[in-house]
Image: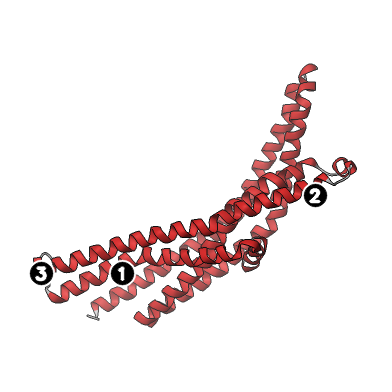
Amino acid sequence: MFKTIKEVLTWTSYYRKPMLRGFFYSFLASMFSALPYWITAQSIIVAYQQDSNLASYKHLPLALFSLLAIVTCILLRFTFLYLKAKNQESAGFKVAAKTRLQIAERLKHTSMGYFSQNNLGSLLNAMTTELSLLELQSTKMIDLVVNGYINFLTVTLFMFIIDWRIGLVTLCAGLIATLILEKINQRSQQNTLVANKIQMNMANYIIEFIKGMSVAKTYGQGSHVLDGVKQTFHQSKSIRIKIQKKFVTLNAIFLVVLDLSTVAIMALIALDVFNQQ
């Protein structure tokens, strides 16, 4: 996983500073999205300590202050999300466009023998589908992973400060989830070559289908040409479903670990309540 992140950062090295600024803004946006819950909880605790009657007008100043703080957090969250998008999410599109131009420039000076010896579908796939996936997903994937780990470490530290048992549950759940995600990543890498080959074959068959359709229709063979394309699409569907099924078990375990950790934390909190802590 981290190797993949390093490769994408290398790919976008020309825009590294905006990318790093985007990570920072994304982290701040995540923090300001969580703060309203903490502010609400603290306000209720303070209000209850002042007067157990939470419907009392004595709490109006505190309620107004809490409302102002929450609205401020929401505004700051969207401000940092805007700054993140401005600095980071455009990098993938810029780098992909630059890469396409580099490929086109290289192909311009390539001999005609290259095109007859190599699969045109692979070239089409590289310049369209693969680069489209990179420009759409690469920066977002890095943003989610990097900030996800930063947020996890921050929350875990906060949990240890509140209660070491809750912190330990959070840390163990996070480590197990990380191992499962790493296993999913390994399987993804193993299936990448297969998925790329499928995509390349589809692109090649579509090119041949379009190029040969006029001739095939002239001789009444249009349906025969279409049968080959249908078979390719069917193979693509079957293989991709087979690949997807390999992730179902790991994904289910991942979700169970997260849910069980939540139940464990709630149980510990309930135990403290019963013990008047």
Q: Secondary structure at mark 1?
A: helix
Residue at the (67%, 59%) spot, across then down: 189
| Viewer-closest of 14 and 56 | 14
| Count of marks, rendered view | 3
- Image quarter of residue 128: top right
Give the vertical position of 210 relative to 256 (above or below).
above
Image spot of residue 193 (x, y percent)? 72, 53
**Could you tell me which residue is drawn at 16 percent across and 76 percent down?**
49
Marks 1 and 3: which is nearer the front? 3
Determine which residue is flagged by label 2: 106
Side (left or right) of 241 relative to 256:
right
Q: Nearer the viewer, residue 173 or 83?
A: 83
Q: Are marks 1 and 2 in contact (CB under 8 Å)?
A: no
Circle 1 packing at 10 Å, graded few (<14), some (14-19), many (20+), is few
Tell me, yes or no, if residue 240 can be seen here: yes
Residue 163 in view of the camera:
no
Going by the numbered disc 3, the residue's amino acid type is Lys
Circle nearer the N terminus (1, 2): 1
The span from disc 1 to disc 2 (Cα, nearest Å) is: 55 Å
Q: Is residue 173 above or below residue 247?
A: below
Residue 89 location (% of width, % of height): 54, 55
| Rendering quarter of residue 91 | bottom right
Which badge, 1 or 3, comes first in the chain's sequence? 1
Q: Nearer the viewer, mark 2 or mark 3?
A: 2
Q: Is residue 158 left or right of residue 38?
A: right
Separation of marks 2 and 3 at Cα, in angstroms: 74 Å
Read off the residue under disc 3. 58
Tell which of 194 and 158 is nearer to you: 158
The answer to which of marks 2 and 3 sits earlier in the sequence is: 3
Checking the image for residue 38, the label placed there is 1
